[in-house]
Amino acid sequence: MAKSRTNSTGREARSSQPRKGKSKGGKGRVTLGQIVAESQPAQEQPIPIPHISHQRIAERAYLKFLGRGCVHGYHEQDWLEAERELIEEARAANQNA
């Protein structure tokens, strides 16, 4: 068992040699980001959401409202469905271009 050295304050003296696995200047250190990146499988980049204007979504949602016979109470559902449909259409058009 190695003896620990103490300095004049009674604290354990540090060795001038770098610890194993570490080197001076920060080289050789592993960051948390590197550990996470290595532990997760490579994933495809998410497809960006194309910009759809407020006006286009509103028009599509209104058509859904009319198609239902002008029944009120479904405005959020109509809006979200219209937005989703327009995004899917824009993505399909971008893939075909």
Image (spheres, rainbow, N blue to C red):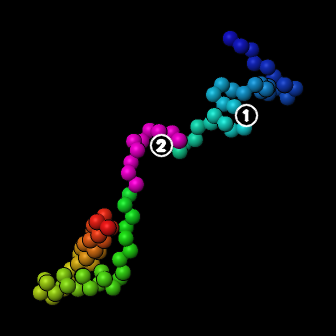
Residue 93 in view in this figure = yes
- Foreground of the two, 62 or 72: 62
Q: Is residue 32 above or below residue 95?
A: above
Q: Is residue 25 above or below residue 63?
A: above
| x then y, percent, for residue 84 | 27, 71
- Foreground of the two, 84 or 3: 84
Q: Disc 1 on helix, strand or loop?
A: helix
Q: Which residues are magenta?
A: 34-45
Q: Quadrant of residue 82?
A: bottom left
Q: Disc 2 on helix, strand or loop?
A: helix
| x then y, percent, for residue 63 | 20, 85
Q: Is residue 79 magenta?
A: no
Residue drawn at x 23%, y 86% is 62
Residue occupied by mark 2: 37
- Foreground of the two, 60 or 44: 44
Residue 76 in view in this figure = no
Residue 27 appears left or right of 44? right
Report the amino acid beneath label 1: Lys
Q: Residues within 10 Å of mark 2 (few under 14, many from 20)?
A: few
